[in-house]
Amino acid sequence: QVQLVESGGGLVQPGGSLRLSCAASGSIFRINRMNWYRQAPGKQRELVALIGSGGTTTYADSVKGRFTISRDNAKNTVYLQMNSLKPEDTAVYLCYAAIVRIGARYDDHYWGQGTQVTVSS
């Protein structure tokens, strides 16, 4: 079994910062891409940022220059540093990872449970 567990969400004022973490655990052979998504009430799920196994990153236009995705392969963990937060960043943030389990030939898709980020004064 493989699990993704997120942490670091909360309430922050506009202009503030938060750092999200997502740790993968279980029978992991290799983690390929790791992504952060978000979903606000009444809106579609949106890809926020992704990082490949080699460290290549991609960001949504709405967060470029404010958010930074990184990963620690030794800890099977992906991070999302969020700076200059805006009220429109309020959403549930979900972690996704493409993971090759021990003994498997291909990766499977795994999701975390989500963590709430609220930006409000």
Image (cartoon, grey):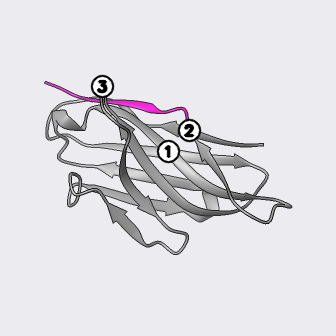
Residue, x 82% and y 61% (percent of image)? 104
Q: Nearer the viewer, mark 2 or mark 3?
A: 3
Residue beneath the point at 46% across and 64% down: 51
Left or right, 93 with respect to 29, comes to left
Disc 2 target residue = 112
Contact? badges 2 and 1 (CB < 8 Å): yes
**Callout 3: helix, strand or loop?**
loop
Q: List x then y, in percent, for residue 8.
A: 42, 37
Q: Nearer the viewer, mark 3 or mark 1?
A: 3
Residue 26 position (above or below residue 100): above
What is the CA distance from the residue labelled 3 to the residue labelled 1?
19 Å
Of residues 64 and 9, the one drawn nearer to the viewer in this rendering: 64
Going 44% across and 32% down the picture, which residue do you hit?
A: 115
* Magenta region, residue range: 112-121
In the displayed structure image, the side of residue 100 where residue 97 appears, left or right: left
Residue 52 on image: x %, y %: 50, 68
Residue on which disc 3 sits: 42
- Residue behind mark 1: 95
Q: Which mark is residue 18?
A: none
Q: CA distance from mark 2 to mark 1?
A: 5 Å
Residue 105: give x, y in percent of width and height.
79, 66
Q: Amino acid at mark 3?
A: Gly
Q: N-terminal of the two: label 3 or label 1?
A: 3
* Residue at x-position 43% and y-position 49%: 36
